Image: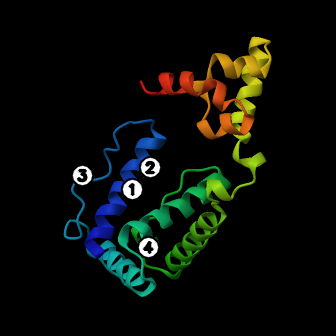
């Protein structure tokens, strides 16, 4: 697992640097970075990071994603480019960052509501805004917009608006393509 963390860490560093340089080549990050290729000090930290992963029941990818996500937040706060170094991965702070990331991820997952469970008003909010925007730009009635371009909207939205029976043939014909 330590080798996997090492490889994923170097890939993540390359990706962060490439993002910062807008696709430029991050030449200072070695391409083939395995546990055997790094020095003894870094190797020790990657092994400690693997121990943290095993203790917390996380896989290597989740661990690295957590570390880089929390450092990215710190970068935004301090308004400078920060990335974790290998010695940051084997300390107590790495465990805390992993647990914080797991908690944030769990909260986000708990907020996801199935479409059928959403109130109708929230469920069709985006399509309603799209319809109003198109009507405003064209200076037409929303009913005329629905009649001219029913394929821009979902079947459920058209049923909700009460125009499905009138537009189902046009909608089916245009969405088959």
- Pointer 2 or 3: first along the chain: 2
Residue at image mark 3:
31
Would you call the spot at circle 3 few (<14 residues within 10 Å), some (14-19), or many (20 or more)?
few
Q: Contact (CB < 8 A) between labels 2 and 1?
A: yes
Q: Is residue 163 above or below residue 141?
A: below
For residue 156, what is the image quadrant? top right
Q: Quadrant of the N terminus?
A: bottom left
Give left or right: position of 56 versus 48.
Answer: right
Q: What is the C-alpha distance between the residues marked 1 and 3?
A: 12 Å
Q: Residue furthest front?
A: 165
- Pointer 4 or 2: first along the chain: 2
- Pointer 4 or 1: first along the chain: 1
Residue at image position (66%, 34%) is 158
Q: What is the C-alpha distance between the residues marked 2 and 1?
A: 6 Å
Give left or right: position of 90 versus 166.
Answer: left
Residue at image mark 4:
89
For residue 74, what is the image quadrant? bottom right
Residue at image position (43%, 27%) is 176
Q: What element carries label 4?
A: loop
Would you call the spot at circle 1 few (<14 residues within 10 Å), some (14-19), or many (20 or more)?
some
- Pointer 1 or 3: first along the chain: 1
Q: Contact (CB < 8 A) between labels 1 and 3?
A: no
Residue at image mark 1:
12
- Pointer 4 or 3: first along the chain: 3
Residue at image mark 2:
16
For residue 126, what is the image quadrant? top right
Q: What element carries label 3?
A: loop
**Residue 101 picture location, percent across and down:** 56, 69
Q: What is the C-alpha distance between the residues marked 4 and 3?
A: 20 Å
The one nearer the camera, 164 or 137, is 164
* Label number found at residue 166: none
Q: In which quarter of the image is the C terminus?
A: top left
């Amino acid at each position: 697992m330590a080798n996997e963390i090492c490889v994923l860490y170097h890939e993540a560093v390359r990706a962060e640097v490439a993002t910062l340089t807008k696709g430029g080549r991050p030449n200072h990050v070695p391409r083939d970075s395995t546990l055997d290729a790094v020095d003894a000090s870094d190797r020790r930290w990657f092994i400690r990071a693997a121990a943290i992963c095993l203790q917390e029941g996380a896989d290597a990818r989740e661990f690295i994603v957590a570390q880089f996500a929390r450092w990215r937040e710190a970068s935004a706060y301090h308004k400078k480019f920060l990335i974790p170094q290998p010695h940051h991965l084997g300390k107590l702070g790495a465990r805390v960052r992993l647990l914080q990331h797991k908690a944030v991820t769990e909260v986000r997952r708990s907020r996801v509501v199935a479409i059928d469970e959403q109130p109708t008003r929230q469920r069709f909010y985006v399509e309603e805004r799209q319809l109003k925007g198109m009507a405003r730009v064209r200076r037409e009635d929303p009913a005329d917009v629905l009649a001219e371009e029913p394929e821009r909207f979902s079947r459920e939205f058209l049923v909700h608006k009460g125009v499905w029976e009138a537009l189902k043939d046009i909608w089916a014909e245009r969405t088959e393509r």
